[in-house]
Image (cartoon, grey):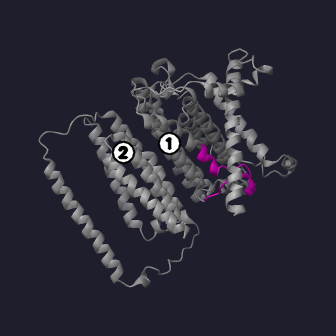
């Protein structure tokens, strides 16, 4: 009873709260990083250096009036934000924050596939939001989003096949243990796969330079144009929760998860004094910063360029990578 | 006991959602019910300890194919009335015939399963040289079921080539 119900529930409660709090501070961090990239100060008024902005923003969003357009499909209009947030949070179930059983909720033998399938459900939130709004621009945005997300999902899944070939397991804990056994982070073994997954992660989370579903200059805001108040902020929660979970999974798959740098070098054993979860958190933080850095740097792709990159560049490279990995695996 | 409760709850949900899919007037709603239906089927697979199949069910059907359905449904204008010349009675006759065939099939399954020896159902599963859900599935696919597997892949290839030729007539 204690082991099967109480402890997992406690873990889930702690993890959910941690995600939601870190999302609010991520929004602040993004504003600060982009401000510094543009030689501005960013939010400075609330608290020292604007730190309390992270608490004030959610309160504002909760207190705002929630409007449902009169021509909207009521049921789906309410369902869509929930459908986009829940998969992003469920995906954390298989993310291990450390090797000990205390640090993950579940280690299932299809962990990586579970992550892929759960995140693929999130696209319904965007499509249904656009359709249920009964408005032109959100519908266009959601059509774009569904085409984009499906294309890049294929590319990412194909790329991860080569990583699975290298690791020999689908369990997230197993993949990190395989990296420990091989004595190398798989980012060095599979550099092509790492770059492809990073590009795919940008596209899957609708981030710059692939943020066409919410291209505000041409779509007056994108699929969430008709949303306001807390429902609007649920979409933002979903986007940032997705960024965190994808950063965590990329760090686990390619950067050794909770392992220290150079896990095979004995001379660096003193680095083990730092606990594993701190290593993982710093790796996740690096990826989060990378996402913001890219947003501050790159312009948005055109829609045909986006589709060409997905189908004619990423998928062929991913397929070639699988073949090369398979040949190397057989030969070595 | 817990398994039986899970099974019957899921069965009610799956059947109820299936009825909802074909009775809802708005097409987008019925696609949403279809997704929920597939998710319930995936949970049923988990209860049967076929985790790999459950995950693939979500990834391929709920996450891939139904998204394409939704894509098409949103693009096509479905508010148009059905064609005039369609005879509603003809549809009813076809439906009656299909229902009869389905009932016959179900009856045949029940009769067959009661008439044969029960020992063959509970026969021990073949010994696998590998452990784990995915490993055993892969082992079976590449040993006992190699030819059906390859035939299915060729069939998919043919479908893909056909789709490309239909899309690009000037090839």
> Does residue A27 belong to the magenta stretch?
no
Instruction: Give the chain of mark 1.
Output: A
Q: SS for tag 1?
A: helix
Q: Quadrant of residue A50?
A: top right
Residue B97 occupies which quadrant of the picture?
Answer: bottom left
Task: Indicate the position of residue A139 as horizontal and vertical percent values.
Answer: 41, 29
Residue beneath the point at 67% across and 31% down = A290
The correct choice, above or below, for A94 with respect to A54 in the image is: below
Rendered position, A154 above or below B126: above
* Point 71% across, 41% down: residue: A18
At 23% from the left and 65% from the top, the residue drawn is B101
**Residue bearing the label numbered 2:** B30
Where's residue A169, x and y in %?
Answer: 61, 58
Residues at marks 1 and 2, CA–CA distance in whole angstroms: 24 Å
x and y percent of residue A292 in the render?
A: 65, 28
| In this view, the mark in front (1 or 2) | 2
**Mark drawn on residue A282:** none
* Same chain assignment for discs 1 and 2: no
Which residue is pictured at 72% across the width and 40% down the height? A283
For residue A153, the mark is: 1
Residue A242 relative to residue B92: left or right: right
Question: Circle 1: is it few (<14), some (14-19), or many (20+) Cα within 10 Å?
Answer: many
Residue in the foreground of this view, choosing between A319 and B44: B44
Assign the N terminus of chain A to one quadrant of the image: bottom right
Kindly identify which chain the residue marked by label 2 belongs to: B
Query: Is residue A261 among what the camera can see?
Result: no
Q: Secondary structure at mark 2?
A: helix
Rendered view: A62 above or below B53? above
Q: Magenta segment: does it hold A107?
A: yes
Callout 1–callout 2 Cβ contact below 8 Å: no
Q: Which residues are magenta?
A: A89-108
């Amino acid at each position: 009873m204690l082991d099967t119900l109480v402890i997992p529930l406690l873990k889930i409660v702690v993890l959910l709260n941690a995600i939601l709090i870190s999302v609010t501070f991520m929004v602040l961090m993004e504003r600060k990083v982009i401000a510094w990239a543009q030689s501005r100060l960013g939010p400075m008024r609330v608290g020292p250096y604007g730190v309390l902005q992270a608490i004030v923003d959610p309160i504002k969003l909760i207190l705002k009036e929630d409007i449902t357009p009169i021509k909207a499909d009521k049921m789906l209009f309410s369902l869509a934000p929930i459908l986009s947030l829940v998969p992003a949070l469920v995906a954390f179930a298989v993310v291990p924050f450390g090797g000990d059983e205390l640090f993950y909720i579940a280690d299932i033998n299809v962990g990586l596939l579970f992550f892929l399938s759960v995140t693929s459900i999130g696209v319904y939130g965007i499509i249904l939001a656009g359709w249920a709004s009964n408005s032109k621009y959100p519908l266009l945005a959601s059509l774009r989003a569904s085409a984009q997300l499906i294309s890049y999902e294929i590319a990412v899944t194909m790329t991860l096949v080569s990583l699975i070939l290298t690791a020999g397991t689908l369990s997230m804990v197993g993949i990190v243990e395989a990296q420990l056994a091989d004595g190398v982070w798989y980012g060095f073994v599979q550099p092509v796969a790492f770059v492809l997954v990073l590009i795919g992660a940008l596209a899957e989370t609708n981030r710059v330079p692939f943020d066409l579903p919410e291209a505000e200059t041409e779509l007056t805001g994108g699929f969430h144009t008709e949303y306001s108040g807390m429902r609007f902020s649920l979409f933002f929660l979903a986007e940032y929760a997705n960024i965190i979970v994808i950063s965590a999974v990329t760090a686990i798959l390619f950067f050794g998860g909770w392992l220290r740098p150079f896990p095979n070098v004995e001379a660096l054993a003193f680095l083990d004094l730092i606990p594993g979860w701190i290593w993982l958190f710093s790796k996740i933080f690096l990826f989060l910063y990378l996402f913001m850095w890219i947003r501050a740097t790159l312009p948005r792709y055109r829609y045909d360029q986006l589709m060409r990159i997905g189908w004619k560049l990423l998928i062929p490279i991913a397929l070639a990578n699988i073949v090369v990995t398979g040949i190397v695996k057989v030969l070595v | 006991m817990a398994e039986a409760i899970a099974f019957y709850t899921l069965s009610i949900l799956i059947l109820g959602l299936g009825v909802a899919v074909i009775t809802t007037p708005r097409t987008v709603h019925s696609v949403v019910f279809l997704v929920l239906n597939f998710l319930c089927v995936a949970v049923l697979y988990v209860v049967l300890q076929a985790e790999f199949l459950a995950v693939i069910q979500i990834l391929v059907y709920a996450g891939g194919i139904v998204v394409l359905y939704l894509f098409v449904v949103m693009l096509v204008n479905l508010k148009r009335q059905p064609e005039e010349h369609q005879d509603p009675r003809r549809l009813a006759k076809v439906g009656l015939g299909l229902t009869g065939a389905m009932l016959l099939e179900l009856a045949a399954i029940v009769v067959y399963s009661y008439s044969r020896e029960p020992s063959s159902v509970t026969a021990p599963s073949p010994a696998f040289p590998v452990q784990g859900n995915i490993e055993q599935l892969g082992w079976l696919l590449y040993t006992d079921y190699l030819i059906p597997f390859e035939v299915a892949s060729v069939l998919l290839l043919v479908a893909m080539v056909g789709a490309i030729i239909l899309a690009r007539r000037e090839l």
